[in-house]
Image (cartoon, helix red, strand yellow):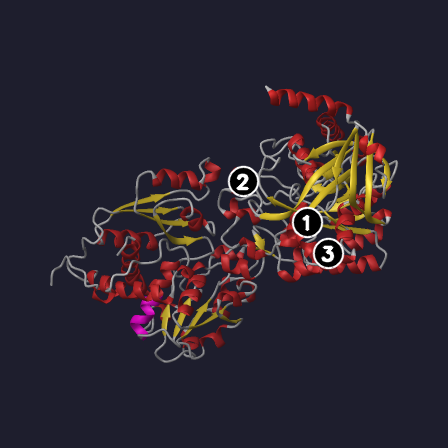
Amino acid sequence: MNPDAVNLADDAPREPFAVRSLLSADDLTAGDATRILDAAESFFEVSRRPIRKVPALRGKTLLNVFFEASTRTRTSFELAGKRLSMDVVNLSASSSSTTKGETLLDTIKSLEAMQPDLVVIRHAAAGAAAYVAARSTPAVINAGDGTHEHPTQALLDAFTIRRHKRDLRGLKVAICGDILHSRVARSNAILLGKLGADVHFAGPRTLIPSAPESLGAKVHYRIEPALEDADVVMMLRIQRERLSGVFLPTLREYSRTFGLNERRLALAKPGAIVMHPGPMNRGVEIAPEVADGPQSVILDQVEAGVAVRMAVLWLLCGG
Amino acid sequence: MASTITASGSMGSAATRDVLVLTEVRAIDPAEGLDGVVDVVIEGGRITRLGPGAATDELLRSERSDRIDGRGAWVVPAFVDLHAHLREPGEEYKEDIKTGLTAAARGGFGHVCVMPNTKPVNDRRSITEAMVARAREVGGPRLHPIGAITMGQNGGELTEMADLRDAGAVGVSDDGKCVMSAAVLRRALEYARTFDLPVIQHAEDHTLTEGAQMHEGAISARLGLRGWPRVAEDVIVARDLLLAEATGARYHVAHISTRGAVRLVRDAKDRGISVTAEVTPHHLMLTHEAVLGYDTACKVNPPLREQEDVDALRAALADGTIDCIATDHAPHSSLEKDCEFAEAKPGMIGLELVVPVLLRLVRQGALPLARLVDALTAAPCRVVSIERPRLKEGASAELTLIQPERPVTLDGFASKSKNTPFLGKQELGAVALTFAGGRIAHRLSGV
């Protein structure tokens, strides 16, 4: 096999990918998402070769613009671009650029003048990626905009579930924890729902948005009914700053009432998989034995991230 | 050359045409019990004759007469806005008293009450006087300052309300900020009552709206924006009504936005408490769904609510529970609006949009025309002490001519700002002429 070749036979016939920028999981039809996941299968294989690089996007430029700190997502996009032979530039900027005198629009306009093909943006403000996409020429990928969305996380989660469970249709997926502030929960509820999964949210009432049904998930205010007979259990990170906002009295009580331990996991189906978008608070939302246990696929998610982002970059650059 | 001669000729004759005659116009002034087709004669800044056949053949033949054919048009008393932000002093790049009053005239307003959140805050006589003096220089609609309740709008020490009133203030408000302390509000109500000033509350429990960007509900959940729950308005209105009852003061709810607050005001009125309320055109016409796509033009405070709130507001306006319509005209430049949603400042402009936007409600049958006119004219004058513009022989000419079927494009504003989601929309209903303080403050070309 030619190491420079990518086997994308599944993707033929080559219709142009209809999505220009990926800002929300809602930008994708089930067909678009499946096409990304199928392409990711091929790229997943590339990442396991001795030479983990293909020339698919040689000469294209990727700007990773992170207004918020990130290790895993930024690295994942960077590796994805590099494995496609893109020129990748990482930029860290302050989210509060307005206080430093430069607006988000000015920052993006200066970067756009450098002629990138794709801009990946993470920003603390909900809607920031859409704001940038509406005012710039290159395609934009939302790598997390405040408490709104993180669509490539949902894609890599769907990819991971698909690899373990084959088909998402009819699977019960329990997403547990701080739904209110979670962009991962939003994107996953939308995307997994589109792919046919039965999505359930669980969390204390202080961390569930009002009118949660608008996100297309069933809502539980105890973790147990969400876990019962679940095929997939996705735990969300609890952020310590939520304690100051009177959302939670203590992490101890949260862990005791909503943490995933072996006893609670037994409520799920025997072969259920356990996911976490990271970074984990071991001993808070997830017990170490579960995080490192046989049902955990948390590291698979990280590996899937690179393949899925390769697929997204490749398709948004015209496939 | 010919056009120059014609122009100077017409100017020459205009100088002698000092009588305005509106013929066969539908005159609507609910406070006067008037709704009928009449002629209106205006001379020397006053309505000299009003009634069927008031425009005699002699008047119409006179070279002094400037005749406007009123068929198909309505004449109403000039509008009174209880709630505008004209940004002067301090933020003249958004609006100033001159552009704000020009916008008001074009929107049909003869009187504009301006909120005190200028820079510096209008919390003292000198600023109130400066505003009034500047507005006199400009001419056109009359400006009525609303003074702050507390110094710097900080919710602490009371302002010198007697001084403010003597300088021209018609009420007090910390608009944009709620008076959070019950103790301070109690004293403010008592003190304002001493000088017969209404206390206008921006009802928002700030502890419930920290970081809030829009109405809390299905759309905020979807957009990941921090929600501003209805109850943050309701708890303040409920508390304030008890304080208003206890003090006997005149209490006015600014820009009411929730069905819960409407219910509280209705119950309080039934119990005889001295309470009034205003609603904005945008809270009557838009819901939180307008925010989808992170449209910062739709970021307002209080936020756009849900259909059930809109329905409750419309019903309450129709039955008089909500007394008046106020614009909350809040101009902002692209600096405050072309940015991330969380960075954007709340507010939209409104002075030039009231007629084209709200006539839709009348056409839909959601609001009787007489109630719309009352809510923009006599009702606000019952809240603050402004002498009511009226359609009556002998009254000062303060009136607005509306062409209800005339198509308009909502653009080309006199305001310096254009932050409104109605920008560029096509509507029916134009303000053809505004008389403010006895003089023509606005006249559409061709009228």
User: Disc 3 or 2, which lies upstream in sequence?
Assistant: 2
Identify which amino acid the numbered label 1 is placed on: Thr
- Going by the numbered disc 3, the residue's amino acid type is Leu
Q: Earlier in the sequence, mark 1 or mark 2?
A: 1
- What crowding class fits label 3: few (fewer than 14 Cα within 10 Å), some (14-19), or many (20 or more)? some
In the picture of the structure, the residue carrying the numbered disc 2 is B336
Nearer-the-camera pick, B140 or A87: B140
Q: State the CA–CA distance, disc 1 to disc 3.
A: 14 Å
Q: Which mark is residue B367?
A: 3
Counting from the top left corner in percent of width and height, residue A76 is at 30, 55
User: In this view of the protein, can residue B146 be seen by the observer?
Assistant: no
Q: Quadrant of the C terminus of chain B?
A: top right
Secondary element at tag 3: loop
* Chain under callout 1: B
Percent position (x, y) of residue A214?
52, 65
Q: Which residue is mark 1?
A: B280
Question: Disc 1 or disc 2, which is closer to the eye?
Answer: 1
> Magenta region, mostly helix, strand or loop?
helix
Q: Is the residue at mark 1 from the same chain as the one at mark 3? A: yes
- Residue at 55% over, 60% down: A247
